[in-house]
Amino acid sequence: MRSVQPAELTACDREPIHILGTLQPHGFLLALEGPDLRIVQASANLPDLPGRPADRAHGRSLREALPEIGAPIVDALRTQLGRDGATYLGTLTLETGAGARPYDLAAHRSGELTVLEFEESTSEAAAAGSLDTLYPRLRAFIEALHGASNVEELCGLLAADIRLLTGFDRALVYRFDRDWHGTVVAENGNGVLPSYLDLRFPASDIPAQARELYRRNRLRIIPDAAYEPVPIVPALTPATAAPLDLSQSVLRSVSPVHVEYMRNMGTMASMSVSILVEGALWGLISCHNKTPRRVPLQTRNACDILTQTFALQLAAKERGSLAEQRLALGAIQARLLGFMAEEETFVEGFLRHAEDVLALTNAGGAAIVTGQRCHLLGRTPSERQVRGVYEWLSTEHGGEAVHVTDTLSEEYPPARTIADTASGLLAISISEKYASYVLWFRPEVVQTVRWGGDPTKVATKDPAGGPDRLHPRQSFETWKETVQGRSLPWSVPEVDTAKDLRAAVLGIVLRRAEELAAITE
Ligand code: BLA
């Protein structure tokens, strides 16, 4: 096997996982058309119903094919469904050739069609579903969330409670970074599966289209990774000649690459719930079991409520800490502006109050550079090296008001030699006409990242034959990488404060110029 080049990984992003045309076998599906809910497509595993041959379901109305379905459900199918997420419509028992079988019903709209799914119900489902069972748990969870003092604690509570609700061997809270790599930030397990706490996994483990789907449909479950996919018949919807869009399906069959990944990880069952903060995918809660495991629809819905409640608290905590930082930086900025106003030129104000200039963005060093002058504050590279950064900035990024990076040497390779003082750069241009900048520098913070498997071998191609598709990596052994040339990232409030300062400096300079013009007129 050879490892795969990054370009080939985009093949992962292209797999159309919402229209693969198959289901997992722990239930069946009907696609219904028009106001009389006529069956136009069905999964190939319709149960054997005495007196009603499964192959004659197509073309009949739902009430005709399944008179067990009462008027309230038919009404709900016609009027209550949304496009985002499936609606749980209760439990229905069907008398099949193999005896009475209870099913949990879930429905959603897909294009012009109404999709009704019948998920085999378990005895656990009945107990889990009652509000009496769920309510005390949800209440206790919400109270505990209120008591949590930071994000780590919140994540720990979520992992513990989801595992308690579902009984999986391991529950992980997985957080995406800005490059869509993810880190396990909290974990709760019974020791059956290995710990992944603090490990990072590459973005390609959950490709872009899967992330987009998981933003729109927050929950998925794979009860048995050794399942045989069940086709939908006919494969194409007759009216549109297109495959049925299963984005919101609860039984959707998942990508074969991912099923293989699960097996390589030593897990036969998984469930994951999206954590959305302000509409964006912040992370996932990812649960695993060594052996196959089903979790009833009602419990999954409870997990979703729990996770979204968690997300609200998380957003509030994150907003709170950003607001605190803004307030603190705002106070420094006000002081600095006062100093600047007292001096002949703003540069003098800066030089006299170097500590505040550095504190404004939590930088290690700073420089004010114009065509002729270069003033250095705190820990910076030499004047010659700072001039080098200035020349590069004014040539390559001349039009930008603000330039921010925490890996300067990736953009400007000569910065490799100044990594100890200048791995991070936050620059504001302070003149509309001339190349003049305030530069803030941050030192290198060497990091050891522990990956859950070698990130350079995320996938392999199997030349031994079979269809030419990608295979996920086989090893999840911890792989250590030392990251160099990187500073702590600049936070949004730090960058915003620098922008505000820019506006103030431009204002002061302009006012002084006008005053000068008025005097000399
Ligand atoms: C899906 N990959 C997923 C999912 C998870 C992960 C959670 C969602 C499905 C589920 O709940 O099981 C990955 N699971 C992880 C990670 C951790 C975890 C990182 O617990 C860390 C602790 N996967 C690959 C490669 C490809 C790939 C190389 O490794 C592409 C070629 C694809 N992963 C892939 C696809 C899906 C997926 C296509 C979507 C599956 C679907 O919903 O159909």
Image (cartoon, grey):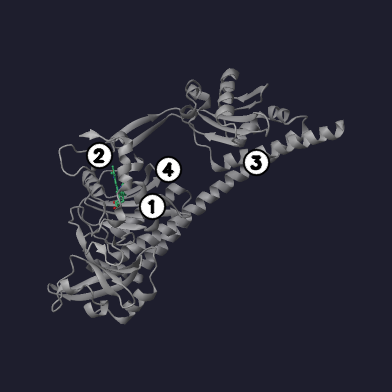
As drawn, is 3 to the left or to the right of 484? left
Placement of the C terminus among the 4 image quadrants: top right
Say which label, 4 or 1, has the lower sequence index: 4
Q: Position of residue 520 (x, y in %)?
A: 86, 30
Q: Position of residue 207 (x, y in %)?
A: 34, 46
Q: Residues within 10 Å of mark 1 (few under 14, many from 20)?
A: few
Q: Is mark 3 within 8 Å of ligand 1?
A: no
Which three-letter amino acid code belongs to the residue tagged 3? Asp
Q: Which residue is disc 3 drawn over?
A: 500
Which three-letter amino acid code belongs to the residue tagged 2? Arg
Kindly tell me whether residue 332 is visible in this rendering. Answer: no
Q: Which residue is disc 4 drawn over?
A: 177
Kindly tell me whether residue 159 is visible in this rendering. Answer: yes
From the image, state whether disc 2 or disc 1 is nearer to you: 1
Q: Position of residue 427 (x, y in %)?
A: 59, 32
Say which label, 4 or 2, has the lower sequence index: 4
Q: Which residue is disc 2 drawn over?
A: 473
**Separation (CA) of disc 4 from disc 1:** 15 Å
As drawn, is 352 to the left or to the right of 303? right
- Asked if the residues shown at circle 2 and circle 1 are in contact, with their CB atoms under 8 angstroms apart, the answer is no
**In the image, residue 330 above or below residue 131:** above
**Separation (CA) of disc 4 from disc 2:** 21 Å
Which three-letter amino acid code belongs to the residue tagged 4? Asp
Q: Residues within 10 Å of mark 4 (few under 14, many from 20)?
A: few
User: For residue 402, what is the image quadrant?
Assistant: top right
Q: Which residue is disc 1 drawn over?
A: 212
Please, what secondary structure does the residue beneath circle 3 have? helix
From the image, state whether disc 1 or disc 3 is nearer to you: 1
